[in-house]
Image (cartoon, grey):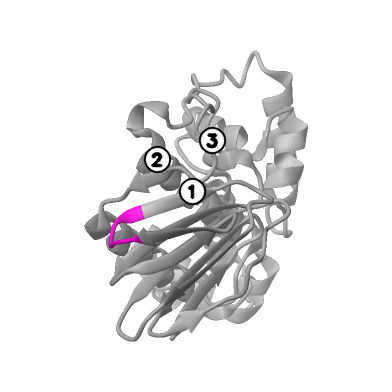
Amino acid sequence: MRIEMILPQLEIHKISNSFENVTHAHEDQYQMTIPIQGTCHFTLENKPLSLPPGDGLILHPQDRHSFHIGSGDSVMIIRIKDQSLFPETATKSRELGLRQPFDLAKVNDHFQKWTVEMLGMGQIDPMAVEEMEYRIILELQEWIWGASNRLQLLPVNAVSDPHYSRVLDYIHAHFTEQMNVGTLATMAMQSRFHFIRSFKSLTGLTPYQYVLQLRVEEAMKQLERSVMTVTEISFLMGFSSTSQFFRVFSKSVGMTPEQFRKEKR
C-alpha cells in the first residue's frame, strides 16, 4: 500500500507492507526516511543500516541509497527539492546521512492532518497548494531544528514599503483571477517562504486567505445587488467550483449564499 502527496517542491510517500527498491540517487532533493513500524533495512553508499521505528535518516542530493521493508512494516519518505529543510538560522554542518530521532506520534498526526487537508481541497487552487506546502515545510523544519529555528520575520510596515504597497494594489485589482505566491513574492522582492510569513505579519492573513476574503466581500455585494445566480457569482469571483464557493462563503459569513441573499432582500 502506498499513499502519496505530490506538491511542487515537496513529495511525501507512506509505504506499507513489503517493498524494495533499487540503488538510486535524487539529483536535487533532500530525503527524510522515517520508519513507522518494523525495521527499515537501508543501504547508503553501499553501507547497510538497520533503522528501527522513529530512527530516521536525512540524505542530501546525490546520496546513493536503497531500502526494503517486510510484511507489516511501514515507512515514510519525504523529499524536498530545495534547501528549505535548512532554515537560515540553523547550522548546516550536519553530516550526510545523519540519523535523526523522530516523534512517531507527531509524525503520524501531521501526516493524517496533511492528507485530510489535501483531500478536502477538491479542485485545487495553485495558491492554496503553495501555502499548504509552506506550512508543511515549516513543520518539517521544527521536527529537525526545533521551534526556535523556524523562519521568523519582523512585521512589515506596508506604508513605508513600496514593494508591499504594489503587492496589495495588484491583489485588489486581480483577486478574481488565478494568481500564485511566486509572482507576488517577486513583486515584494522576497523568497516565497519569507513572503508568506511577512504578508501574514502585515495583514493577519496568508495571501490565499486574503484573496478569499476579498472574493467573499465582493460576492456579498453581488448577492445583494445583482440578479446573477449563485453559480454565476461563484465563477465570476474566481472560485474553482460552486462547492468551493459555498464552503468558503459559509465558513466566512456563517450562512450559505442563498440564505444571505434571502436575508438581505
Label 2 sits on a secondary structure element that is helix
Identify the mark at residue 86; answer none if there is no mark: 3
Q: Who comes first in sequence, dot 3 or dot 2? A: 3
How crowded pointer 3 is (Cα within 10 Å; few <14, some 14-19, many 20+) is rated as some
Label 1 sits on a secondary structure element that is strand
Question: Residue at 26% of width from left, 58% of height from top?
Answer: 104
Name the spot of residue 126 as percent of width and height, x first. Answer: 66, 61
Quadrant in which the C terminus is drawn: bottom left
Q: Spatial distance from mark 3 to mark 1, Cα to Cα?
A: 12 Å
The residue nearer to you, when weighing 88 against 233, is 88
Label 3 sits on a secondary structure element that is loop
How crowded pointer 2 is (Cα within 10 Å; few <14, some 14-19, many 20+) is rated as some
Question: Residue at 50% of width from left, 35% of height from top?
Answer: 200
- Magenta-tinted stretch: 51-55
Q: Inspect the image, locate mark 1, and give the three-letter code of the amino acid beneath it.
A: Ile
Disc 3 to disc 2: CB gap under 8 Å:
no
Residue labelled with disc 2: 144
Name the residue at the top extreme. 160
Q: Inspect the image, locate mark 3, and give the three-letter code of the amino acid beneath it.
A: Phe
Disc 2 to disc 1: CB gap under 8 Å:
yes
Name the spot of residue 53 as percent of width and height, x first. Answer: 28, 62
